[in-house]
Amino acid sequence: MKQQIIYNEEDIEKFLELTKFEKESDNSTQNFKKLLNVQKKISILSNIKVDDLKQIVDDIQFTPYKYKDVIIKEGSTAKEIFFILSGECQVFVKNKKVGELHAGETFGESAAIFNTKRNAQVVCSKDVTVVLSFCINHDNMDFCAEALATLYKNLAYQIHIKLEDMNKHAR
Amino acid sequence: MDKKTISLVVKKFNDIYFKNIHQIVEKNFDFIDSLGLPAPKQNYLFTYDYLTYVYDIFVRIDNKFVSHTLNKLKRDIDNLQELLQIHEDINKEYEEIFDEKFLPKSQLFTYMTQKLEQLKEQDNNPKEVHTLQHHLKELKKVYLALFKNDFIKENRYILKNLKEILNTKIYYFDKLLWIEAQKSYTINTKLKKINMIKGYESKMYLLEILEVIMPYSQKYKYFEKCLKVYK
């Protein structure tokens, strides 16, 4: 009978890394499934094929926030895009309230995609607000060009709607 | 000798015969448990030939890509595969084991065989020789029936455990293989050329292979079946 293989510390570390990686990938699979359930509601992700979405969306998180919790800090450089699943938020610029966000609305997309600083602070205004956040993986740009083009088109449309809304209020 | 006593003799034999393999199984389960490697839900045993095929391709592209851990894991799996084969064969060869290893260890059987030989040598009591031969034949039948039952049951238990261990190790071999391959510049460049950038994993590579391999060949059919495991 052949001698049994003995694994040393270095091997054990590699295996532990693998299990960690496994758990993370299990979590991200679950989160991706949850994202698919609400994809239609997230306007910037509409019309993107599931396989492509898998490639361009990263770091999906579902986070419950409590009243007064800060979701986005003004001037910060985080890269997440947020979608409110339930609850409400308020938007502040230089401590002045400028708007409200409700379930089904997306925020933080411009700074995330154009890599600029957050221009407003978003604070939870309900007892519990559940927010879905994700990042866009630009590294896969080469082979997901079509999906990213759709994403930018959706984003442009959303900015257009926001501008129209602002114009309406200005008139 | 009653059946219970014979069963005890068989059990004693099994304990000695399977001692090493029990230790190997136990050590492997301890290893898996201590690292908290969760057992995969799918059956990856079937994919090992495919993984070896990929491993060999990668070695040809970059023979330095294999880490000590990956190398050890492969040797470990190969050893376990060998053991699995040995124990699969045991199920078919139980009669030989019974004749060659079990019977010579049975005191009663050895005693009766020796007695028969003595009688045959004396050659003065053919009737007694005939009766003893008959008893011996009957005893062998009873022994064999009980041996077959307990021995194969024990071996099946070992096979089940070996498959479980192999399944877990093959699953992690698959994961580690792709992680190591990703670290190799040469392999990366090759994979990018075949559009593997969409994901370094067995499923994607299988899809690529199926695109270029001769359809309906044996290999094609095998890879197609492997793909079902990854779905």
Image (cartoon, coloured by chain):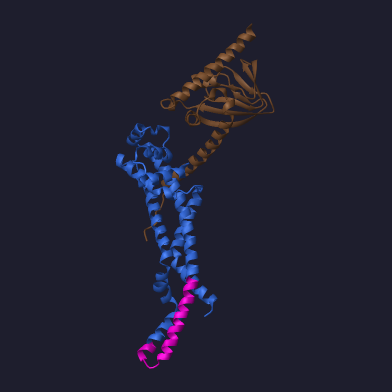
Tell me the magenta residue range. Answer: B118-147
For chain A, give the colour: brown
Q: Is there any visible trace of residue B43 in the rendered image?
A: yes
Residue B223 rendering spot, x and y as whole percentages: 39, 44
Front-most of B134 and A28?
B134
Residue B192 rendering spot, x and y as whole percentages: 36, 32
Question: Is A128 situated above or below A113?
Answer: below
Front-most of B20 and B110?
B110
Q: Is residue B139 magenta?
A: yes
Most frequent secondary structure within the magenta stretch: helix
Farthest residue to the bottom: give it: B124
Front-most of A16 and B80?
B80
Residue at (45%, 25%) from the top-left corner? Answer: A138
Residue at (52%, 16%) from the top-left corner? Answer: A156
Residue B10 rendering spot, x and y as whole percentages: 48, 72
Q: Is residue B140 magenta?
A: yes
Question: Which image quadrant for residue A86?
Answer: top right
Horizontally, residue A70 falls left or right of residue B60, namely: right
Farthest residue to the top: give it: A171
